[in-house]
Image (cartoon, coloured by chain):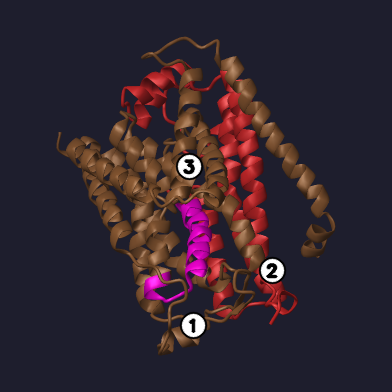
Chain colours: A brown, B red
Amino acid sequence: MISKFLNRHQGGLRIVRTILLIVIGAAAGFGAVYAAEGTDTFGLSPLTFFIVLTLVCTLIGVFAVLAGVGGGVIFTPLFMGFTPIDSYIVRSTGLFVAMVGALVAARPFLRKGIANIRLLYTGAVPYAVFAVIGSLLAGYMNTALGPTGESFIQGALGVIVIAIGVLFIVKKNTEYPEVANVDGFTQKMDLPMPYFEDSLGKVVNYKLVRAPVALLLFCGVGLISGLFGLGAGWAMVPVFNMVMLAPLKVAATCSKVMISIGDTAAIWPYIQGGGMFPLFAVPSMIGLVIGTLIGSRIMLRVKAGFIRPLIIIVMFGAGIRLIMKAFS
Amino acid sequence: MNEENAPKPLFSGVIYGEFAFWLAVIGSAIAIIGMMIYFSGNQFFDAQGLLNGLWSGQTAEEIWRNASATKEVIHGHWYLDYLTTSDGIAMLGIGVSCLAGVFGAWGSFLVMVTKKDNPTVFMVFAGLISLLLTASAFGLITMH
């Protein structure tokens, strides 16, 4: 019934979407005008802060898309490493922007059937549970451990960010991995769901393997995502593609939808803990969404291979900076 | 096999995507409207104080003590009691966006139950996820 309603009212829904986008744009514009009345603090008025943050996050969004990563994985290390903003607030906002990006992106993947609902719910259980544990741990460290907890978070995130940079260099994703033997557990789960691949003009039937190993790995990925406020596509895509041998497109789309589920679970303890401030979260979200849209359009026209090494350098720089901050 | 004969996406997945997209967009619109009013005044968090706090590396608790209207941290859904303030509205928008996944998961689970378009095990997984997200959103999973 709902699908009939959606099909029948596609035109109307498009108009609603356009109106909402206009409201968003107009509201952002009016906000900027009103903010002009603010007074300076540390050389920044709330207006300047709002605009500068929106622009910076737009740039992050553009570069992230061109480099083939989520905005959250660049946002959190950059703001933790190179601004004085408290890490709990940065992580809370990082998780929020990663979640919103994933929520908006999920729709076309599920409509086309490329994101495998069975696969993503199976992975989402360990991922979401451990993401919540990670965010609770973050809250505990923030309140109970004080500066020691802050230093630990900075140092550990620094190591993780450098590891992500190394992963970008060494990982070799395969578009359509070959599967020889399927283990009994994965066979029993009946996870694969064929989909129509536009570029090939045919249905792709695929097999999956090693589901138990992947489930264990998702526990670790969830913990890192919740504790450090990172999007986790950088880790999930290799787990789907290199461990379970899912086609790259299935891996990328499933990881995006799983981020939207897991980060929804993890974000609430941060909000309940008072770590979310609209003046910081809203421009970050607007910037990353706009940047992602711009980046997607640029990607269709230019060869973006040069961006990847740049992002790797940024990751190494942010990682080293975080480790230095941890020991200072 | 051509596109007409291609396997149809499961409605339990489609419904998740629809809820996720629309609630995220609506929530974002509310948050931006809230920020528009925020800059014109009627603030729960004093804008200058908050900016000071962020830029001087204050913790979330310190910012609450120095810049909020209550001068103390309110844990939970604080914005629901302050919807007459601009940042209360902005925070409500953020909350609506964060609820998108919760509604999506429940929608997906209910479709699985009614249409039985997936084996039972995935229905159980979807049910578990829905419960976990709801518990998290209601503040049942919290340090405070």
For residue A168, what is the image quadrant? Answer: bottom left
Which is more toward the observer, A210 or A219? A210
Q: Residues within 10 Å of mark 2 (few under 14, many from 20)?
A: many
- Give the residues in magenta: A241-269
For residue A324, what is the image quadrant? Answer: top left
For badge 3, the amino acid type reads Gly
Q: Image point 32% across, 26% down: which residue?
A: B58
Real-space Cα distance between discs 1 and 2? 22 Å
Q: Image point 28% across, 41% down: which residue?
A: A318
Cβ atoms under marks 1 and 2 closer than 8 Å? no
Task: Name the mark nearer the viewer: 1 or 2.
Answer: 1
State the SS at label 1: loop
- Chain to which mark 2 belongs: B
Residue, disc 1: A207
Which is more toward the observer, A212 or A80? A80
The relative height of residue A285 versus residue A64 in the rendered view (above or below) is above
Residue farthest to the right? Answer: A8
Q: Earlier along the polypeptide chain: callout 1 or callout 3?
A: 3
- Chain to which mark 3 belongs: A
